[in-house]
Amino acid sequence: MQNTLTVIRQCVTPGMLVIHHGKPWRAAVNKDGKLHIHTLTEAKPLKDLLVDIVLNHKNEPEII
């Protein structure tokens, strides 16, 4: 189990690993009031105010 932290959408930067509906997604861009996330096969914009980000072993955001 990986550590996660719930943050507001505006704090997420491109490359961060985000958990959405139990699946890992990569954050792409934060524009037009939406956080755009994607996997290898799908992409979607998020309007959720709070999102869960994955933390590494140093409790820092996981950047991929």
Image (cartoon, rainbow, N blue to C red):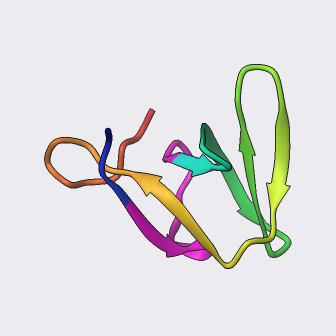
Tell me the quadrant of the picture where the N terminus can be found: top left
Determine the residue positioned at 81% across, 75% down: 33
Tell me the quadrant of the picture where the C terminus can be found: top left
Tell me the quarter of the picture where residue 23 sits: top right
Tell me the quarter of the picture where residue 29 sits: bottom right
Is 7 on the left or on the right of 14, as rendered?
left
Q: Position of residue 16 (x, y in %)?
A: 49, 47
Determine the residue positioned at 72% across, 20% down: 40
Instruction: Give the extent of the magenta segment.
Output: 5-17
Tell me the quarter of the picture where residue 8 sits: bottom right
Is 18 on the left or on the right of 5, as rendered?
right
Position above or below: 58 against 48:
above
Is 60 on the left or on the right of 35, as rendered?
left
Position above or below: 42 against 10:
above
The one of 45 and 31 positioned closer to us in this rendering: 45
The one of 48 and 14 positioned closer to us in this rendering: 48
Determine the residue positioned at 25% across, 54% down: 60
Determine the residue positioned at 31% across, 50% down: 55
Q: Position of residue 59 (x, y in %)?
A: 20, 54
The residue positioned farthest toward the top in the image shown: 40
